[in-house]
Amino acid sequence: MAFTVAIVALFVIGYLLIALEHPLHIDKTAPALFIGVATWALFALGVNYFGYEVDFAHTYHQLEILFHPDAPASEHVEGLLGHFVIEIAYILFFLLGAMTIVELIDMHDGFHLITSRIKTNNKVKVLWIIGILTFFLSAVLDNLTTSIVMVSLLRKLIKDRETRLYFAGAVVISANAGGAWSPIGDITTTMLWIGGQITVLPTITDIIIPSIVCAVVPFALLSVRLKGEFPHGDEETVYKTTPFERTFILALGVGSLIFVPVFKTITHLPPFMGMLFGLSLLWFATEFIHKSKQRSEKSKYSVLRALSRIDTPSVLFFLGILSAVAALESIGVLHALAEGLDHSVGNHNVIVLIMGVLSAIVDNVPLVAAAMGMYSLEQFPTDSHFWQFVAYCAGTGGSMLIIGSAAGVAVMGIEKIDFIWYLRKFGLLAFIGYLAGAFTFLLMNGMLF
């Protein structure tokens, strides 16, 4: 018990250091990496030397991996770490591939083809244009990839950083809302889809309207706050690439991103494989279209340069946070939390609402996995309103904190958004939208009374 408390306390301290990044002048990646390693180190030390007892059989069962009862406890810790490293690597390789593709499009001025078509400088109009694009694009790609693409667009469209941050925060809300109603739009919705809890058409029809409400309400409130116009970022653009190069790389890059869910559906391989496949095609393409240029000029548009430009600290931040959450899942804390809610609250709608709020703090993946383990398909059949509500709440709840979702972490890394700034400016907006969408879902399905 003492080690469980110590590991949780370590996680909370690291979380506070991340939240207070700017006042403390400590980059968020440092505490994220620290708790990512320290929680596992404390776990291993407790098991190996101090008799720390963990129900490994139950943990293995929840993770649907093979348990070997005769193996020493130290091997179980290492086995759990290996299991989570594989899952985290899937996300990190996906992120690396997506960021590199986006950088390649940017290096070839591809985003100018889109931003140049946004003629208005009115903040409110641009807010809704960006919001609608993000909402529907995240359902086709996923919320993580879409957030990276849309923030890259914003960096070309709006040069003033303070103004741009409001739009970046709106992208997080819209990306998560848009990803919730599509089986490929959010990792938790995909988990429920693969697990047989939901199917495609009922998910879309049941969740799309609550998701629209979840995005529209914060956008309407934000429209009151945003006033006036901003200087257009593309007015004096000097292109360094030809029209063919810009159009070709944009089309191939966006096509590669859209092909990722298709690749997954056809091959049943993890999404990062499709992302890396798309990157390989772009690598071939850039080598080919620039082959006649001098080496120094060719290097400006190479994948190697794109790799040097991606935000590596954000990738390491992901690694640290996800590793720390995995440690909490391994010692059974997250499952115990979910079970505690089930026993103390009782009402399933309220439980799912609370889980959505908690997903902004400790990651929605293990919480949804815990729900899938606690509630059987006999109790709640495929496409029951319960599972659809889980998909909505887990997908949109993370918007309340900047590190509550993959989309938020990506935007935080790209734009260096402060945790407290986002909490003050967008936390309440996201919470209101979350509740509005949840109320809409419950009302539509006759679950309020």
Image (tube, rainbow, N blue to C red):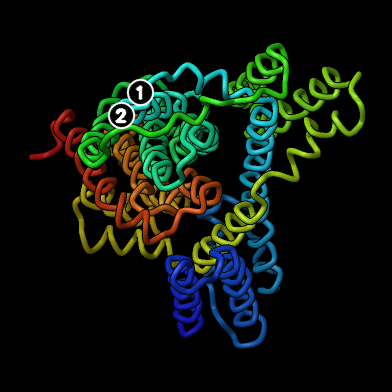
Say which mark, if any, is on residue 204: 1
Give, as a three-letter code, the residue at label 1: Ile
Give, as a three-letter code, the residue at label 2: Ile
The image quadrant where one finds the N terminus is: bottom left
Q: Measured along the vertical axis of the image, is residue 298 above or below residue 116? A: below
- Within 10 Å of disc 1 (Cα), the crowding (few <14, some 14-19, many 20+) is some
- SS state under label 2: helix
Say which mark, if any, is on residue 207: 2
Q: Are marks 2 and 1 in contact (CB under 8 Å)?
A: yes
- SS state under label 1: helix
Residue 28 lies, in percent from the top left, at 54, 64
**Which residue is at a point 22% across and 64% down the rendered structure image?**
344
Viewer-proximal residue, 84 or 164? 164
The residue furthest top is 244
Visible residue check, residue 190 = no
Viewer-proximal residue, 320 or 444? 320
Residue 20 lies, in percent from the top left, at 43, 69
Q: Measured along the vertical axis of the image, is residue 385 above or below residue 411? A: above
